[in-house]
Structure formats: C-alpha cells, structure tokens
Image: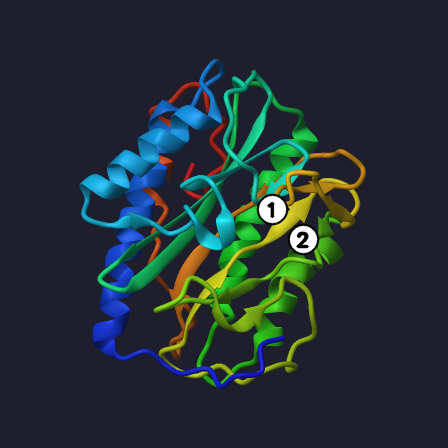
Amino acid sequence: MFNSKVKPKSSEEIERIRESCIIVVKALAHVASIIRPGVSGLYLDKEAETLINDLGAKPAFKGYNGFPASLCISVNAAVVHGIPNKEEFKIGDVVSVDCGSVMNGYFGDSAYTFALGEIGEGVKKLLTVTNESLYRGVESAKTGGRIGDIAFAVQDYCEFTHKFGIVRELVGHGIGKKLHEPPDVPNFGKRGNGLRLEEGWTIAIEPMVNLGSKDVYQAKDNWTILTRDGKPSAHYEHTVVVRNAGGEILTDHTPIETEIKNNANIVNISRNI
C-alpha cells in the first residue's frame, strides 16, 4: 500500500483531469468503431496515438517505465499490460484495451473489454459481471467511506456472488499529476477497512476479473499479465472523483458503447443495451 498522504484535488485540478479523461474516452470510442476480426493491436495503437496527439494531449502509457506503446491491449488470457502487436484478432477473441492520456500536466485513465463475434455464455457473463462490478465500486466511492467499501463491492459481486476470480496482484490507484498516485484501490477487501475516503480524491477503479482462477503470472516480455489457467479475463476502468453521493465518473463510457452498438463485430454487454 502507498504510505504517503492522499491529497484532495481542487475544482480546477479536477477539470484538468476531466479534460484528459474525455480524450481517453474519445480514443477508446474510436477503437470501438474500428476493432474487428482481421485488424491488429498495432493498428489500433497507431490510430489511438494519432487521435490523442491530434486532440492536443500525449499518450500516458508510451514510455512509462519503458512501456513501448500508447495502448495496453490484452487478448483472451492476457489480463492487462499487453503490448500491441501485428497479430490479427479472430472471431471469439476477448480484447481488453486500456488507455491513458496526459494534457496540461494531468492524467486520465480508462479501460474497456471488447468481445469479437461469437463468444460463449460464460465469457459473456464474465464481461457483464465485471462491467457491472465497476459501477458498484464507483457507487461505493463516497466521502467518509473507506477504500475497503469499494473493494468489497467489487469482490462481493464478482467473486462471492458469481464465483469469478479477482486478480490480487494488481489494483486501482489514485490519479492526477501522476498516472499512479496514492492510494491503492484493491478489488478485494472488507467493508470499513482501509483509508477513509475524502471529498475530491481522484481515483481509478478497475476490476480485473478472470473466468477461472484468480492466479496470474507475468509473461517473458516483462509486461503482459496472464491467467495461470489460460482462461479469459476482463478489465473495465473509470477515473472517478470521490463525492458525498458516490463516485463522480470522469470517463463516461457512453461514447464507447454508442460505437459498440454501431459495430456489428462486437458483442454488446453494456448496462444500457
């Protein structure tokens, strides 16, 4: 866990974070409009990088601790941190896309998982449950609550109710002038535990949930995290502000889900089907 004190953001800072978040969503919506079997992660990465640059921002991930791309693209058994490559997507692939941008010194971060063509009911349920758990976590990001309230909301829905495996080694995080700031925001834990949430904290909530076991390992590329049992994983993420009534979402996924509805290659698992 981070030990440094978490500082609430001012209204001006939140608006700057919001600006970066809007660009992230535009990039992910563009991905949603062009992803299909036969295209590659490398193609999506170049498209997203161009759009982010054209909008006056910079990709947050490229060069971060040496990461070589603008998007993290994680396919099937890859949980997160996948490096885009030339391999073409196939029908049935589950593709998680994580995107970050930085503009005017502040970061935005979000992720969405796309299922291409025919997928089994188990995989569809995994995506639907993981996506829903994100919003349960957001609703628990209330001033005066605890980090553990967010963690429990995600774990209760994904693991206790639906028996999917929640990754333990990777967690959400604070965000602002840095891509990763305190506090850690786990997807597992107990209500009432952890740091007390303060009005104006900006955090990234990001359930990473496996169809099978929670166990993962790191690939030889020193980046990609894979499920130990080889089963698919899902990843959804919002940047939010802690508020009295629950988290205020800065990365509204509506533009992404609108593009999904217009792209017959993607299975629509959005909450507003």
Q: Position of residue 5 (x, y in %)?
A: 49, 86
Q: Which residue is mark 2?
A: 158
Q: Earlier in the sequence, mark 2 or mark 1?
A: 1
Q: CA distance from mark 2 to mark 1?
A: 6 Å
Picture quarter containing residue 171? Answer: bottom right
Instruction: Spot the residue most to the top.
Output: 38
Foreground: 119 or 221? 221
Q: Is residue 204 visible?
A: yes
The answer to whether the residue labelled 2 contacts the one labelled 1, judged by CB atoms less than 8 Å apart, is yes
Q: Is 127 on the left or on the right of 270, as rendered?
A: right
Picture quarter containing residue 34? Answer: top left
Q: Is 22 on the left or on the right of 99, as rendered?
A: left
Q: Is residue 259 visible?
A: no
Q: Position of residue 172 (x, y in %)?
A: 54, 62
Please report the residue visible at 75 percent of the width from the left and 57 percent of the height from the top.
160
Per the image, label 2 sits on a secondary structure element best described as: helix
Q: Which residue is mark 1?
A: 129
Please report the residue visible at 56 percent of the width from the left and 16 percent of the height from the top.
91
* Amino acid under disc 2: Cys
Foreground: 62 or 171? 62
Q: Tell me: residue 24, above or below residue 30.
A: below
Q: Tell me: residue 31, above or below residue 211.
A: above
Per the image, label 1 sits on a secondary structure element best described as: helix
Q: Quadrant of the C terminus?
A: top left
Please report the residue visible at 46 percent of the width from the left and 62 percent of the height from the top.
204
Q: Position of residue 175 (x, y in %)?
A: 41, 67
